[in-house]
Image: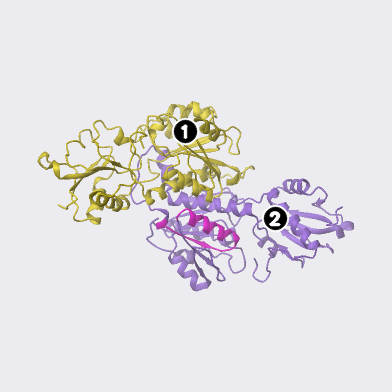
Chain colours: A yellow, B purple
Amino acid sequence: MSDRGRVLLAITGMDLDAWKEAFTSHSPDLQTVSTVDPAEAASIRYAVAWKPEPGSLEGFPQLRAIFSAGAGVDHLLGYPGLPDVPIVRVVSPDLTQRMSEYVAWQALDHLRRGALYRRQQRDHIWDEPPGQPAAGEVTVAIMGLGVLGTDAALKLKGLGFRVTGWSRRPKDVDGVITYHGEDGLTAVLADADILVVLLPLTEATRGVLAGDLFRRMKRGGPLGAPILINAGRGGLQNEDDILTALDAGVLGAASLDVFNREPLPADHPLWEHPRVTITPHAAAASMPSALVPQMVRQMEAIEAGKPVENLVDRSSQY
Amino acid sequence: MSDRGRVLLAITGMDLDAWKEAFTSHSPDLQTVSTVDPAEAASIRYAVAWKPEPGSLEGFPQLRAIFSAGAGVDHLLGYPGLPDVPIVRVVSPDLTQRMSEYVAWQALDHLRRGALYRRQQRDHIWDEPPGQPAAGEVTVAIMGLGVLGTDAALKLKGLGFRVTGWSRRPKDVDGVITYHGEDGLTAVLADADILVVLLPLTEATRGVLAGDLFRRMKRGGPLGAPILINAGRGGLQNEDDILTALDAGVLGAASLDVFNREPLPADHPLWEHPRVTITPHAAAASMPSALVPQMVRQMEAIEAGKPVENLVDRSSQY
């Protein structure tokens, strides 16, 4: 047993073995466990958690911090009886990079009429309809300007898009027109051709992607109707409202990586909608090999009495 | 008639009216014609040409320059009896921007397994196979480091890809590992997961995208087998060899925007290949409204005896 104690892996819905292997490979002296004999509860100093089972995080008197194994922390903040220790979020260049890839990929697929050209290919049709806008004629609004939203904004800007951003509190991002608060939301939506959502899931954001918000988006832009890209959390979106807005032409198309129920049930109508692009919560996989070194460094900092980075603020819920 | 004379539009396969309108809107005093009475041949001082009909460019004693209406100039250099006047290529930020959008879009679609997730959506399958590489683990090689290739290289770099480049003659591009000449070609191919082709069509490049070249590409990279993206010219590629290489696993996939025969015949087997993405020569449309101002500026420079930019070198054929 190392002097950092043992690490509890309270993980569901991710590959537990990959996490074990990543710890073993990076820190062979650091023991990980996924179940704990009550007699040894005091050996647990840290937990790495993803959607932990009820009861799995309590009863560890020496617990010093809980690390979220993925970008969101709603799965922890919604956990009944969450121990009163620091909650540490994942901020990883690898995860940030992957999220920006996803956002750029989907924004370009909508800009460059991917669905149209795939349909034409299926039917052997050679036709280039007029009116293809350049990226600079299209405004992408990023909701949520944390680490992920900021990086996505800068990469979209680099591709030539006009980029705006919205966050709850004021934020500055180079070359990006930023808005904040409720008034700012009205302004950013009214000006958005593509809305990219990278918000945390909190009491304030749950269900925010609904009919009322969609109706506040820009009409008559160069892409026809506004487009939604949600790579944040499924709980942000009202899926019935998305389908209604698509069929009413209030939304032109949607790329969804997250859903209220995951896996998305096989009989859910979103699968079949011709203007919906579904990926299986794959926008930015948490790669244990990329995240463990950072977690171990943070554990060492805590042991040395140094300040912890990327602490979750329980009052703002992210 | 303006003192710049009249402008002949010798254009096929593009929207002639859009060119006329763009000239009228930008320079109302500049007369454009698409047919010329022989008695008025001396009034033609400039021609804007795209795949001109045989015989359409000769017999203009006052012709001072021919402007290509699109990025390639092979349609002019292959024209029998091409008048001995300067040939001016299109170099437009708009066209460059659109080409880089296409290249980034297709590179990301291959990186992020677009075809797999579309197939899974069709079948209502929720599955994220392991092994998704990040862009930094994937090498994109750009063949052709002119204005288009250089811009695409920098934008791919900005998205996080490892980027290399090859050109006939040595070129430097910031942050991009560049190769040149025949030895350089062997090195760049052996290291490429995705090959993006933005070469001009010349005697030296015709048919270069063939079995021999595909077999020199990297094996066992993070995407499985190497991927071809041709947004240059159809004449660069041997389409039978592409199909053979795909079916033999020598190529993993291909995105083709250009073809030997355009429109691609409806019965061509490329349409149906599950690992081929076809767009109808739409990667970077020549938008007359974006190109005419630059052409008129160049005409004015020639009238004023100033040097012409973006002159085609007939000996190197681009």
Q: Nearer the viewer, mark 2 or mark 1?
A: 2
Is residue B258 a member of the stretch shown in magenta? Answer: no
Label 2, on which residue? B69
Chain under disc 1: A
Question: How crowded is the residue under tag 2: few (<14 C-alpha within 10 Å), some, or many (20+)?
Answer: many
Percent position of residue B12, x then y: 71, 52
Amino acid, disc 1: His
Percent position of residue B134, x then y: 40, 53
| Position of residue A11 in the picture relative to residue B112 (left or right) | left
Question: Does residue B259 appear in this view?
Answer: yes
State the extent of the magenta-drawn residues as a range.
B136-160
Percent position of residue A125, x then y: 58, 44
Amino acid, disc 2: Ala
Nearer to us in this view, B45 or A148: A148
Label 1, on which residue? A273
Q: Residue furthest left?
A: A39
Which residue does the image show at 66% across and 62% down from the upper left? B74
Q: Is residue A127 above or below residue B176?
A: above
Chain under disc 2: B
Percent position of residue B300, x then y: 78, 58
Nearer to us in this view, A53 or A1: A1
What SS does tag 1 mark? loop
- Same chain for marks 2 and 1? no
